[in-house]
Structures are given as structure tokens and as C-alpha cells.
């Protein structure tokens, strides 16, 4: 019987630097590159609409790459990945299953169960690290506990940065076992039924090639200005690699390798700053593994009693639609809706506005991001929201409430970002672009803008809502932290 291996692709949708692929190739006469679509296993964090869109295109891209090397992606779907794997094993006689590990709590539990079941029926399973520089548990305090402060975590991690042996893309792949068929991609129904996705298609090229195009563009043209540029939503100053990293179309090891290949010193700016952002991604996965309740529950237990505002849905809806009357917040939410991505600085401002000025629970914002971000990532999204809300590990203190006017004036000084996403404000002069409600009436009319008709008045007053948030914080701050 042929010696077949199964390569179970999950969020490692690439051929380069893929340790599971390298393992599966060793000694295999046949290879089954398999993707199982089983969103219910991720419940309550099944992929949102924007993530499904990305996945569709990324799977198509992966299939093209595999086909170019003499193979093909076998697609399957079901509520139980174990059953699918067992069927494929029965159909192909494969004795080994290889995958790169995931770190979300539900994935960890599922994989453990699958491994036990397959081992007991005589298959071998191999899990490898394909998506992180350091897996949870590798970077621990002197007491062997989890770090809760990023700077200390990263100091230790960076001192142990792994060498970067990048695994090359194989030049050819073993054939599929005979007569093995899979589903057509369209049967997974990842594409939206109502076509709202043209903005996504204009903004992104999912897949390994798209990831490398974005990486090269960033490393060769933008990295040099990253330290100043990364906070400017009006410029393309960041890598925009987050969805590619989330889906494993490129690995952080490859990025490290690409920096070194260009002779860039990792200890100095701008590489140190870029690496530190990758470090936040590592830290987020570390936290999620040690505090698996945090996607729903604040790490700081005082926040369980936080007096959130009651909302009949109107304020949340205005925030989601980018109609709060606060230009920087609205521009961010509209960018998100159109492109599936929002600049990090604006994510912080929009999240602060939701949790502090509107005083709505951070979980509502996290859910919206989950559905609309192409880079929606349980670890990063949880960390981001808890950080801004002030209730996570190493979070910004609650009393740090972003002032969206000042943030706009500082990071979008000529209002280009706001004008791009809120064109109804385009003719306002720079002085009022971040606070149109303060503009004199004649200026508004010269700008052809009637507040309340063309663009909303602010749905909350920034000063009084800030004071109310601080009062709410005082009510819980003296209880024991978690
Ligand atoms: C409220 C909130 C929610 C967020 N939700 C997500 C999310 O669901 N998915 C996601 O990938 N990021 C999330 N982030 C983090 C950050 O905004 C994005 O990673 C970043 O904007 C992606 O753009 P980039 O690839 O151009 O980043 P770059 O600045 O080029 O950074 C390079 C990479 O580092 C990682 N990274 C950068 N910043 C962070 C960070 N603060 N935390 C964790 N990893 C980081 C990303 O993988 C990113 O691609 C969130 C931040 C906030 C404040």
C-alpha cells in the first residue's frame, strides 16, 4: 500500500516555511492536502463575514499553488473534523496526519481530542509550530507563570529569538492518492450572498503571493518610515499584513528572515518597532492561552460590576454605521465596513469612544470587529478591546480616555483620512474637520454642509460623557483587581 500522509491545513494557508508540510512530505509517496470547513467547531467564535470572504479567496489561491506543484487542495466540510479525517484515512490508507498548531481554547481542546482518537485507531499525529515565534508556555516568568506585562514578556522573548531556518517551498509535491475527490469551493458558501464585498476585493489580495507582495512593498518602501508613519491613518505607513498573518499565508519567522536577508539590524529602529508589533501578536496568543475566558470576560474582575449604559441599540448602531457625529470615529468605522480593516490608531480611538464616551460594553465592539475585520483574530481582538477598555493585562488605565478631536488633529492633521471616508465633510477647512459641530454657521454653509441632515451632530457630548465615564470608573476602582 502506498505511504500516504495527510496535511491538514487550517490557518497556515501557505507552502513556504510550513513545518507541517515539511513533516508530511518526509517519506510520503502520496500527499493529501486537506482543508476541513467546520465553523461550528469554533463556536461561539465561528469566522465572521469578512473572514469568510478572505478564507474563500485564500483557499482558492492555495489550491492554485498546490496545482502548480502537481497536487490539489481537497476540500471537505462537516460538523466534526475527526469524522472527516477518519473518512479520509479510510479512503486513502494514510497513516500520518500533520498539522500546525492553533492556540484558541476551542481549537486546542478539539485537536487534543482528535489526536487521542486517531492515535487509538493506529494513526500517527504530528503537531508543529507554524504560526508564532514562541508558542504559549515557551516564555514564562522566573516562577514559571505567565507574564501579564508586555514589556517584560517581550524583553525575555527577544533575548531568545529563535534562529530563522526558513523551510523552502518544495519544488514538487507527491501525487494525491488515486480517486480522491473533494468538494467544490463554492459549496462551502463562504462568499456573501449579497455582494457587499467589492471594497474588500479592491483592497486585498488574499493568499501567499498577495502576502509576499504586501511584505515586500512594506519592507522595501515603508519600513524606513515606520516609527513615524505607523500612527498615521492618512498615510499607508503600516504593513497591512494582519490578515495574511492571521490566515498563515506568511509566517512571522519568514518576516524575520526577510528583515535579516536585507541586512536590517533587528535591535535598531525601525525594525525594533515593527518586531515589537509582531511581539504584541505573540503576547496576545500567550494571554489567550493562559486566560482562555478573556474573549467574553474582563481579566480585571472589577469590571464585572462596571456600570455600563443602557442602550436600545440606537447608539451601537450609530457607531457601527459610522454615524456618531465624531469624524475620526466615523471614518474608522466606514473604513472597516468598506475594506474589512481599520488603522490601529483609529481602532483605539473608536474602541475608546464606544467603551468610554458611549459607555457600552467592550464585548459589543469586539463582536462587531469579529464580523467585519478581515484580520479578525481571537487573541489580538481580545487583547485590543480589553487593552482599550482598561480591563485586560497590561491595559491602558481606564482613565486614559482618547479625545477623538485631539487624536484627529495629531494623527490626521490635514484631515485627509476623514475626508476620504466621510466625503460629506470634504469641504470643511482643516480647523474644523475633526469638530464640525464647532464650525461657524457661515463656514458650514460654504462647505455645503447641514449638520443633522448631511452629517450627524455628535450623539454624545465628549466632555460630559468623559466625566460620566470617570465617575463610573470611581465606582469600581477600589474593589480588588482580578
Ligand atoms: C480594539 C482593537 C481590536 C483589534 N483587533 C485585531 C484583530 O482582530 N486582529 C488583528 O490582527 N489585530 C487586531 N488589533 C491590533 C492592530 O490594530 C492590528 O494588528 C493592526 O492594525 C494591523 O495592521 P498592520 O498589519 O498594518 O500592522 P503593523 O503595524 O504593520 O504590525 C505588524 C503586525 O503585528 C501585529 N500587530 C500589530 N499591532 C498589534 C496589536 N496591537 N496587537 C496584536 N498584534 C498586533 C499584526 O499581526 C500586524 O499585522 C486590534 C487593535 C485594537 C485596538
Image (cartoon, helix red, strand yellow):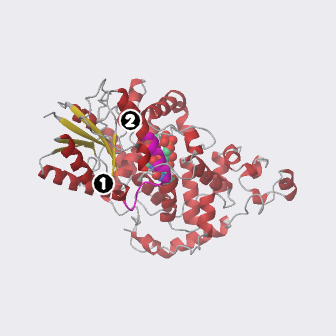
Q: Is residue 397 left or right of residue 318?
A: left
Q: Position of residue 418 (x, y in %)?
A: 68, 48
Q: Residue at x 69, y 43 (%)?
A: 416
Q: Nearer the viewer, mark 1 or mark 2?
A: 2
Q: Nearer the viewer, residue 169 or 460?
A: 169
The residue sitting at the front extreme is 179
How packed is label 1: few (under 14 Cα within 10 Å), some, or many (20 or more)?
some
Q: Is residue 234 left or right of residue 32?
A: right
Q: Which numbered disc flags the more N-terminal residue, 1 or 2?
A: 2
Q: Residue at x 40, y 57 (%)?
A: 46
Rendered image quadrant of residue 293: bottom left
Query: What secondary structure is found at the residue carrying circle 1?
Result: helix
**Over which residues does the magenta segment extend?**
43-58
> Magenta includes 332?
no
Q: Is residue 250 left or right of residue 338?
A: left
Is residue 357 visible in this depiction of the protein?
A: no
Q: Which residue is mark 2?
A: 63
Q: Position of residue 137 (x, y in %)?
A: 26, 50
What number is the disc on residue 213? Answer: none
Q: Which residue is mark 1?
A: 107
Q: Position of residue 441 (x, y in %)?
A: 85, 59
Which is the main secondary structure of the residues drawn in magenta?
Answer: helix
Rendered image quadrant of residue 403: bottom right
> Magenta includes 57?
yes
Residues at marks 1 and 2, CA–CA distance in whole angstroms? 24 Å
Quarter of the C terminus within the rendering:
bottom left
Q: Position of residue 259 (x, y in %)?
A: 41, 29
Q: Residue 175, relative to residue 49: is it above or below?
A: above
Residues at discs 1 and 2 in contact (Cβ within 8 Å):
no
Amino acid at each position: 500500500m502506498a505511504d500516504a500522509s495527510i496535511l491538514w491545513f487550517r490557518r497556515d494557508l501557505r507552502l513556504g516555511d510550513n513545518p507541517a508540510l515539511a513533516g508530511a512530505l518526509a517519506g510520503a509517496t502520496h500527499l493529501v492536502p486537506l482543508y476541513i470547513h467546520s465553523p461550528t467547531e469554533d463556536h461561539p467564535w465561528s469566522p465572521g463575514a469578512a473572514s469568510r470572504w478572505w478564507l474563500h479567496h485564500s483557499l482558492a489561491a492555495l489550491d492554485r499553488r498546490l496545482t502548480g506543484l502537481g497536487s490539489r487542495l481537497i476540500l471537505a466540510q462537516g460538523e466534526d473534523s475527526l469524522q472527516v479525517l477518519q473518512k479520509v484515512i479510510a479512503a486513502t490508507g494514510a497513516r500520518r496526519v500533520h498539522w500546525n498548531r492553533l492556540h484558541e481554547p476551542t481549537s486546542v481542546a478539539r485537536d487534543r481530542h482528535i489526536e487521542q482518537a486517531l492515535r487509538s485507531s493506529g494513526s500517527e499525529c504530528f503537531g508543529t509550530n507554524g504560526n508564532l515565534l514562541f508558542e504559549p508556555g515557551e516564555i514564562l516568568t522566573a516562577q514559571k507563570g505567565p507574564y501579564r506585562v508586555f514589556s517584560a514578556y517581550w524583553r525575555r522573548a527577544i533575548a531568545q529569538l529563535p534562529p530563522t531556518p526558513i523551510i523552502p517551498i518544495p519544488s514538487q509535491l507527491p501525487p494525491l492518492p488515486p480517486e480522491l475527490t473533494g468538494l467544490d469551493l463554492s459549496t462551502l458558501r463562504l462568499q456573501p450572498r449579497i455582494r457587499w464585498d467589492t471594497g474588500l476585493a479592491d483592497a486585498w489580495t488574499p493568499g501567499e503571493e498577495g502576502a509576499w507582495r504586501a511584505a515586500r512593498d512594506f519592507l522595501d518602501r515603508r519600513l524606513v518610515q515606520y516609527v513615524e508613519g505607523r500612527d498615521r491613518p492618512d498615510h499607508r505607513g503600516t504593513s497591512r499584513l494582519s490578515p495574511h498573518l492571521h490566515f498563515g499565508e506568511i509566517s512571522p519567522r519568514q518576516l524575520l528572515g526577510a528583515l535579516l536577508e536585507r541586512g536590517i539590524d533587528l535591535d535598531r529602529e525601525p525594525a525594533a518597532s515593527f518586531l515589537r508589533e509582531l511581539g504584541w501578536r505573540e503576547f496576545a496568543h500567550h494571554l489567550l492561552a493562559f486566560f482562555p475566558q478573556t474573549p467574553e470576560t474582563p481579566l480585571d474582575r472589577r469590571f464585572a460590576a462596571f456600570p455600563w449604559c443602557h442602550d436600545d441599540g440606537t447608539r451601537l448602531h450609530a457607531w457601527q454605521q459610522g454615524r456618531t457625529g465624531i469624524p475620526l470615529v466615523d471614518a474608522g468605522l466606514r473604513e472597516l465596513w468598506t475594506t474589512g480593516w481599520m488603522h490601529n490608531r483609529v481602532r483605539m480611538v473608536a474602541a475608546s469612544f464606544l467603551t468610554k464616551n458611549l459607555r457600552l460594553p467592550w464585548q459589543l465592539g469586539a463582536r462587531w470587529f469579529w464580523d467585519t475585520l478581515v484580520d479578525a483574530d481571537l487573541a489580538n481582538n481580545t487583547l485590543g478591546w480589553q487593552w482599550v477598555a482598561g480591563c485586560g493585562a497590561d491595559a491602558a488605565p481606564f482613565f486614559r480616555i482618547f479625545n477623538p478631536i485631539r487624536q484627529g488633529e495629531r494623527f490626521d492633521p490635514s484631515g485627509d483620512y476623514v475626508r476620504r471616508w466621510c466625503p460629506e465633510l470634504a469641504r470643511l477647512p482643516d480647523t474644523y474637520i475633526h469638530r464640525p459641530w464647532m464650525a461657524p454657521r457661515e463656514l458650514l454653509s460654504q462647505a455645503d454642509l447641514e449638520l443633522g441632515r448631511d452629517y450627524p451632530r455628535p450623539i454624545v457630548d465628549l466632555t460630559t460623557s468623559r466625566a460620566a465615564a470617570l465617575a463610573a470608573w470611581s465606582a469600581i476602582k477600589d474593589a480588588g483587581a482580578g
